Image (tube, rainbow, N blue to C red):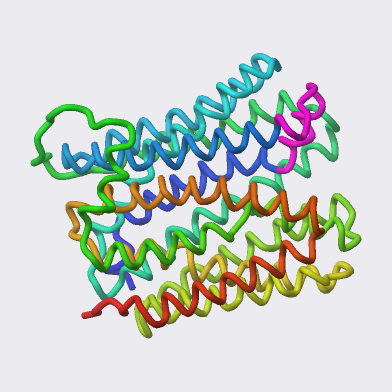
Amino acid sequence: MSRALTRTVWVLSLVSLFTDMASEMLYPVMPLYLQHIGFSMLLIGILEGVAEATAGLSKGWFGLRSDQLQRRLPFVQWGYLLSALSKPMLAVMASPWWVFAARTTDRLGKGLRTGARDAMLNAECTPANKGRVFGFHRSMDTLGAVFGPALALVYLHFHPEDYVTLFLIAVVPGLLAIGLTRLLKEPVPTGRKGAWPGFFASLRYWKEAPRDYRRLTTGLLLFALFNSSDVFLLLGAKQAGLSDSHTIGVYIFYNGVYALFAFPLGMLADRIGVKRVFLIGLLLFAAVYFGMASANGLVMVAVFFLLYGLYAAATEGVAKAWIGHVVPQEEMASAAGAYAGLQSLCALVASSLAGALWMAFGAAVTFAGSAAMVLVVMGYLGLLVRAPQRS
């Protein structure tokens, strides 16, 4: 275990923890703040869609550039810096265009750093411990999603609607993350500078990638088409009778379960194979969505959010480890970035489709339909995608 969790893995994991703490400190209050300054629900949806598309597409672009240069650290440092700067931007001005700029800056920072960071993590792995390393990183990252909302709720309990001060407080963990990146080192770069790629150039990597990568990402992207935003689960919790505080509480509970189990499930993936653990995660997802179609009351919703935390722990870090098994090390940033870019486009479709189904047929059809399609994805991955070789 000590050999798997190297100094670089620890530093990157702590950086992610503090950054996610800063971001998730604002997550429970952003919809309230946006409505407070006059955003409609439609505008909120457009804001989140543009922000996530920016993050996803830029992951591929910057990931490809990182592989061209064989440089990781500058992308990581500048990416975390942009995300930290976006927090005080929200405190400066409340106009819609400025909020769009701040949110997009945050997501651009995420896109800038993600591919290079995952490549740095992958470089610290052996084929036998990829699940453990990525699982540990996801666990630490998600701890930030526990601490951040909890701190925000405590602050707003004593200072209701003081959103501007909260935005400024969120700068502190972001600055700690930036400071920690100064502890990271990387080898002398061996790549060539060359010209900057076109914005969609990274998506072409999918055509040139190894066959196993294309088969794997086809299944992962098919899943993304039916994995809508977690906002719909929170809306489902509200529809099941939960109060606002209980709804935020089960969200924190979900993140706590995710953080607690991501590392041990990553270790399990190294032992029994990433494919088996990922399929178990998809089965949990289907159970949650079938259950939320008829959920009622706090206890039932809490049980499903417990299972949802286990699903996330069994899939998110494990998917990255699986990708790391099927591509060469020097292509990891491009592979992770291309997948992230395509995934963001699928996520836009998934959330739009879920919203349309919800309006037309209600929550039960939306949740049950997603669950049924995920069972199809399980069949594809189980039958057509081979398990990676472990050593």
Quarter-of-image position of residue 301:
bottom right
Identify the magenta region.
28-43
- Where residue 74 appears, x then y in whole percent? 28, 33
Split into 4 quadrants, where in the image is the N terminus?
A: bottom left
The answer to whether residue 340 is left or right of residue 249 is: left
- Where residue 172 appears, x then y in whole percent? 56, 32
The answer to whether residue 357 is left or right of residue 257 is: right
Quarter-of-image position of residue 46:
top right
Residue at (12, 29) in percent of width and height: 194
- Residue 39 located within the stretch drawn in magenta: yes
As rendered, which of 82 and 177 lies closer to the eye? 82
As rendered, which of 87 and 365 lies closer to the eye? 365
Residue at (25, 79) in percent of width and height: 390
- Residue 94 located within the stretch drawn in magenta: no
Q: Work out whether 102 lies above or below 359.
A: above
In the current view of this chain or complex, which residue is farthest to the bottom?
272
Q: Tell me the chief SS of the magenta region.
A: helix
Q: Work out whether 315 lies above or below 173.
A: below
Residue at (71, 49) in percent of width and height: 355
Q: Is residue 152 visible?
A: yes
